[in-house]
Image (spheres, rainbow, N blue to C red):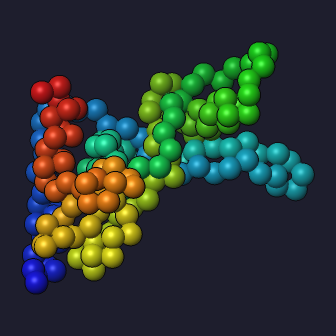
Amino acid sequence: MTDPGAITTDLRAMLSRTIERLESMGIGDEAIASLRPARRIALIPRPAVMDALGRAWRLGVLLLDRDGRLFATGGITRAIELTYETVYMNSEALYRRGLRVAATRGGFALGDTVNFDVIEIALDAVSLRAETGPLSLRDGTVMVRWVAGEGDQGLASLESYLAERTDILAGD
């Protein structure tokens, strides 16, 4: 078995190299937020709002922030101008519009991409072996499940996955 400490150290070094590469190429990041749903406080309606949690690069099924934390992607939306719609929209369109408005209420710039309801991924060997998220540990190699429901065919080494996703963002 591979040393758990070495796995974590190697993983953190890999993420640091990826961050350095993304920063050196000037790749733009995206906002991370938590969604606070609409609610009532003493009969006063409070609209849904997104609270900023930071910024990260979207690398497929993963988000990587400048501190080297990885997140599993959740929902995604864009902040839009607050306007009143007079046209009919189905319930799904109204829900998506509500998410965009919640991002704007959260103070995000118009047009900013906002990732919400993301889940931070534990990067220790025990958590990776448990395979509770998109990352897993196989024979001492950190793997990412980039296609859900495909079994081992949907797995790739995290190192090659990050390199490929970074190349895509760079336009290589």
Residue 135, above or below 8: above
Q: For residue 58, what is the image quadrant?
A: top left
80 sits to left or right of 21? right
116 sits to left or right of 20? right
Residue 86, above or below 137: above
Q: Nearer the viewer, residue 132 or 36?
A: 132
Q: For residue 121, what is the image quadrant?
A: bottom left
Number of labelled discs?
0
Q: Nearer the viewer, residue 1 or 68?
A: 1
- Residue 74 visible in the snapshot: yes
| Residue located farthest toward the right when viewing the structure as drawn | 43
| Residue located farthest toward the top when viewing the structure as drawn | 87
Q: Nearer the viewer, residue 141 or 62?
A: 141
- Residue 23 visible in the snapshot: no
Q: Pick the quarter of the image with the C terminus.
A: top left
Q: Pick the quarter of the image with the N terminus.
A: bottom left
40 sits to left or right of 57? right
Residue 9, above or below 34: below
Who's the residue at 44% across and 46% down the image? 32
Who's the residue at 51% across and 31% down the image? 78
Who's the residue at 45% across and 53% down the image? 118
Q: Where's residue 96, x and y in %?
A: 62, 33
Q: Where's residue 34, x and y in %?
A: 53, 51
Q: For residue 106, what is the image quadrant?
A: top right
Q: Where's residue 99, x and y in %?
A: 61, 37
Who's the residue at 17% across and 25% down the image? 171
